[in-house]
Image (tube, rainbow, N blue to C red):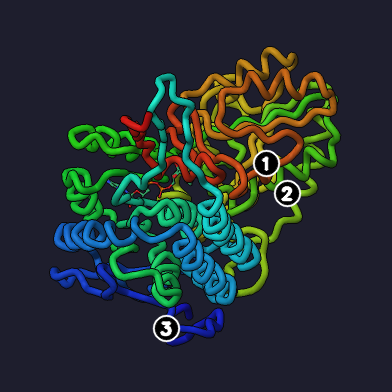
């Protein structure tokens, strides 16, 4: 049983489960009365229903966010930092409950869900601190009697659209810098995972963040375009920050052309993971396990193609088979497992299709290779070896617990294969050769590079892609700048 009344994970605060949109400080249903089922992906049971938002709520959210903007932008950095810090403290206090919500509606193991809350909260804490240390410039004027200044201002109302795979962290990574900069936000969480995002907003309200500063609307996939269209068309919305697939990102980029909004696009990936002959195999296995099997492989920076130099190919394949074979699979509501269910049937069918296509072209299944049982929502942790030549280059995102191994012989070949993709989010490689570290890192076409490390995301560092993985950065001072405009002020007649 996974219904709300059964409370299978033992949430302490069931009142954190919100089922309405939050606009201008009020929890509201969509006037259509339409509802959206929230489902436990492990067993398909409906946890609860949330309101299914549409165009009217979308417009109300813009009204509320633009009305709140002038007051919010006029608050001091110290005030905003204090409110963000209070929100961070509440998230930390309720870390267990928030993690349980994620595990329930998204399926990831509880330990990983707790890690996601800490990671996401880190962005709110980091930007609360950063905004107190963010200065403009005083520019040495080339003409006497003048002062020249560059000041940072919030871009305005920011629309935020996020995916289901890290349902709390992806939204916190946008709310943190947006609010710190003085922007107000309107948000649409993923249709599969609205509860963790709504709970996060409930805690923002408790922390005292003023009405209208954060607005959020859950919506089904069918009704989402109604919301985004209102936001795209409305000139008061000055920025869109989107995390999700590249096709939807392109759609939003095209749609925002008429109002020339600022855009941040955190899109899909096709991460290569290269292991050179001179790698430390213990480090390589550890890094690969983190880069591949976290969140059952459902991560934009998950290793999608593993390229192994021929001298260590067999030894690495053997070690990986043994390690992957030990991973446990099960639902968070049933205990502690390494791998949860995939998000929905569509995702399972995609992974099955990709495995079948690789095998049809000559790949061998070393471990796993199919669902845990027919009709199951769980896919076995899988290692495929001898990936065919054409699948060493650009590949569709697997988004599942499948690790495909392919051989290469020279460094030059590995770099060419790694870069032979329209995407450029993350790449990884393992080597112990210091000269090779810089040589390869500087030639990989991606926004992030992990060297001898598979878990590289951090609020302290800029996260984002190149090529069709998007543009803009989240985290670090660069993440804050994405929500700020620079204004040059020239003070004359001072001489
Ligand atoms: P998706 O693009 O299908 O959905 C993402 C969000 O966009 C959801 O909220 C969805 O409702 C919304 N959406 C869908 N159609 C829309 C439309 N027509 N107009 C406006 N919004 C619309 O992606 P997904 O399946 O939820 O997430 C997986 C994808 O996200 C993968 O490609 C993954 O690589 C990517 N991702 C990227 C990052 C990153 O930081 N670069 C992080 C996590 C996930």
Q: CA distance from mark 2 to mark 1?
A: 7 Å
Residue 321, position as x, y percentages in the image:
76, 44
Q: Earlier in the sequence, mark 3 or mark 1?
A: 3
**Quadrant of residue 250 in the image?**
top left
Q: Which residue is mark 1?
A: 383
Q: CA distance from mark 3 to mark 1?
A: 42 Å
The answer to whether residue 92 shows anywhere in this view is: yes
Question: Element under label 1?
Answer: strand
- Judged left or right of residue 115, residue 31 is left
Q: Nearer the viewer, mark 2 or mark 3?
A: 3
Asked if the beta carbon under badge 2 is closer than 8 A to the nearest atom of ligand 1, the reply is no
Q: Earlier in the sequence, mark 2 or mark 1?
A: 2
Badge 3 density bin: few <14, some 14–19, many ≥20, Cα 10 Å? few
Q: Quadrant of the C terminus?
A: top left
**Quadrant of residue 249 in the image?**
top left
Q: Nearer the viewer, residue 207 or 58?
A: 207
Q: For the point 17% across and 58% down, which residue is it?
A: 59
- Judged left or right of residue 145, residue 363 is right
Q: Which residue is mark 3?
A: 15
Q: Nearer the viewer, mark 3 or mark 1?
A: 3
The answer to whether residue 351 shows anywhere in this view is: no
């Amino acid at each position: 049983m996974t219904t709300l009344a059964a409370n299978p994970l033992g949430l302490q605060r069931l009142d954190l489960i919100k089922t309405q949109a939050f606009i201008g400080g009020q929890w509201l249903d969509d006037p259509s009365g339409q509802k959206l089922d929230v489902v436990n992906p492990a067993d398909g049971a409906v946890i609860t229903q949330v309101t299914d938002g549409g165009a009217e709520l979308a417009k109300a959210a813009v009204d509320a966010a633009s009305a709140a903007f002038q007051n919010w932008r006029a608050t001091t950095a110290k005030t905003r930092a204090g409110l963000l810090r209070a929100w961070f403290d509440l998230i930390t206090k309720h870390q267990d409950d928030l993690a349980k919500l994620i595990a329930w509606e998204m399926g990831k193991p509880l330990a990983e869900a707790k890690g996601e809350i800490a990671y996401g909260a880190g962005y709110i804490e980091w930007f609360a601190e950063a905004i107190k240390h963010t200065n403009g410039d005083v520019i040495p004027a080339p003409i006497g009697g003048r002062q020249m200044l560059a000041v940072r201002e919030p871009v305005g109302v920011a629309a935020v659209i996020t995916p289901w795979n890290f349902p709390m962290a992806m939204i916190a990574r946008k709310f943190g810098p947006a609010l710190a900069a003085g922007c107000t936000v309107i948000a649409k969480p993923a249709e599969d995972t609205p509860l963790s995002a709504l709970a996060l907003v409930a805690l923002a309200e408790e922390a005292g963040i003023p009405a209208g500063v954060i607005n959020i609307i859950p919506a089904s996939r069918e009704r989402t375009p109604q919301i985004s269209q209102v936001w795209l068309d409305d000139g008061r919305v000055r920025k869109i920050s989107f995390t999700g697939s590249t096709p939807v990102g392109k759609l939003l980029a095209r749609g925002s052309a008429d109002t020339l909004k600022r855009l941040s696009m955190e899109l899909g990936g096709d991460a290569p993971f290269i292991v050179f002959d001179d790698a430390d195999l213990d480090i390589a296995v550890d890094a690969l396990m983190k880069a591949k099997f976290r969140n059952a492989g459902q991560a934009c920076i998950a290793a999608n193609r593993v390229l192994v130099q021929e001298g260590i190919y067999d030894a690495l394949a053997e070690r990986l088979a043994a390690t992957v074979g030990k991973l446990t699979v099960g639902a968070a509501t049933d205990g502690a497992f390494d791998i949860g269910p995939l998000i929905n049937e569509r995702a399972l069918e995609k992974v099955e299709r990709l495995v079948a296509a690789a095998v049809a072209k000559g790949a061998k299944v070393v471990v796993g290779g199919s669902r845990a049982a027919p009709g199951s929502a769980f896919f076995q942790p899988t290692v495929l070896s001898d990936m065919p030549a054409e699948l060493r280059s650009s590949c569709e995102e697997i988004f599942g617990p499948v690790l495909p191994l392919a051989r290469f012989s020279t460094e030059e070949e590995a770099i060419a294969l790694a870069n032979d993709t329209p995407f450029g989010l993350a790449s990884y490689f393992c080597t112990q050769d210091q000269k090779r570290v810089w040589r390869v890192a500087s030639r990989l076409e991606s926004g992030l590079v992990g060297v001898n490390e598979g878990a590289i995301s951090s609020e302290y560092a800029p996260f984002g892609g190149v090529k069709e993985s998007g543009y803009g950065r989240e985290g670090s001072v660069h993440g804050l700048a994405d929500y700020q405009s620079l204004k040059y002020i020239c003070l004359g007649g001072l001489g």
